Image (tube, grey):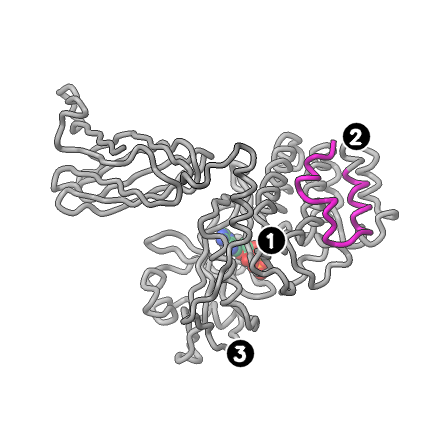
Amino acid sequence: MLYAIGTGMPSTNQKKPDADSDPEFTVNYKEDVEMNKPQVVSVKTRENVKKVEIAVLYPNGQAKMYRSRMRDGVGKVELTVPMPGKFLSSVAVYGSGGIKFLKDFSFTGSRPAELELEPGTRANSELEKIRNRVIKLPDNFHADAVRAWPNSTSYAQSLQNLTFSISDSYSDLKKGKLVRNKNVKIPSYIFGSGNFGTVFKITCDSGDYALKCFTRAAFDLAERYYFISSYLSGINLPMLVGFNYLPSAVRMISKPSQYYPVLRMDWIEGTSLNSYIEKNYNSSILMKRLADEFLNTMISLHEYGIAHGDLSGDNILVSDSGKLTLIDYDGMYVPPFSGRIAPEKGHEHFQHPARGNHYSEDLDNFSVLVIYLSLYGISRKPELWKYNDNDGDKLIFSSGDFLNPEDSAVIRDLKSIGGRTRKLAILLSQAAGMDPLWKGIEPIRIKGLR
Ligand SMILES: Nc1ncnc2c1ncn2[C@@H]1O[C@H](COP(=O)(O)OP(=O)(O)O)[C@@H](O)[C@H]1O
Ligand SMILES: [Mg+2]
């Protein structure tokens, strides 16, 4: 059904005109929208109004903002709903004098008719469909032919002049600004340097981005990111960050003819899991909430057959409100990778002692238990954080604890708490001696342990 709402120009000395009777501000939208099909919300108002903004609150609490310019008093915004349920929205239009109109409306997302199955079977068959989706590289796909990669210092130097270093194809970034990392004492633009690349922050008109510049040859880099992003498109997983692989994006001062690819990610405000625990380990409530949130997050990722591949205290960011975001997808597994080998082995203090190059949706099982038990244990007994030893590369477990669980002081302490903590600690000792991909510790089973 098509709907239109209208409202009057707010005025101090006059009663608001009846919404539907004012021709000067109308919003047209569909009240029922099919999932993943675009709907156009059109806004019509006076000619001097320049900009329209629509804020949409998703049924799961996420919010999204859409912005568009108005032309001759008409603005159009395209929305797609990624899930069923009621979407609450508000539309605001702005002229030269600031906000002019604000109006709330709502619409409902529904599943396409052919997916309406028996209750209970629906979720599973949809997941099956997604997991079995065949993804092919496009014929014209081309990976950047790079033989030798620049190092962090060269990237840091070149990026200080974005007009020079960023290719004309990415004008938004080109006009952006490189941001200093204020968390380190010496002046630096580098936010992290790891296995595959170095991360910088660029702020530009369309938002703040993390730019991962690659420093190590990974021949299938472009192809891997193509598969990962294709698989993730259309799936709503709020714990993942939006990203784009940009081919031929950045060049060095020393070799202006060669452009290198970068991975551009939305910038996530938050602290690493390690520093969040460091700050809050004394709060049992926060630690328990974080433990639950983490496990639920990993359950939904696993349902889609996705494994992060390198879960650790610095690849998980926590926002002030306790929301978790996973970053660093270099080692990610998605179902189209079935049969391949893993590109990396992950942080050792989070991995099964026998982690090799096996690659599957069960890749995270062991690290999920390690992280969940760390958080859950700390929520029961904050002093356990002493086992961190101020080491940013681990939480409370070290690889030695997994090699010899019988001799591990932290596992002994966890067991002595009793109850569910004891059971989880026993499960971890057991898991350390099993196959690294043991399904006995799938995230959903960890949750089920009473
Ligand atoms: N999307 C992002 N938003 C905010 N910070 C990020 C983002 N991606 C990376 N970072 C920062 O950069 C650091 C390094 O990034 P990461 O992708 O983990 O690379 P690596 O561990 O291989 O160096 C992170 O620990 C984090 O501090
Ligand atoms: Mg990392």
Which residue is denoted by mark 1 in the rendering? 308
Badge 3 is on which residue? 148
For residue 192, which quarter of the picture? bottom right
Tell me: 418 left or right of 156.
right
Viewer can see residue 12: yes
* Ligand 2 rendered quadrant: bottom right
Q: Distance between the residues labelled 2 and 1?
A: 30 Å
Q: Relative to 450, is 186 on the left or the right?
A: left
- State the separation of the CA atoms marked 3 and 2: 54 Å
The amino acid beneath tag 2 is Gly
Is residue 185 something one can see in this rendering?
no
Tell me which segment is drawn in magenta: 424-450
Could you tell which of marks 3 and 2 lies nearer the N-terminus? 3
Report the magenta stretch's main SS: helix
Circle 2 sits in a helix, a strand or a loop, which is it? Answer: helix
- Mark seen at residue 60: none
Residue bearing the label numbered 2: 419
Q: In which quarter of the image is the N terminus?
A: top left
Image quarter where the C terminus lies is top right
Q: State which tag comes first along the sequence, 3 or 1.
A: 3
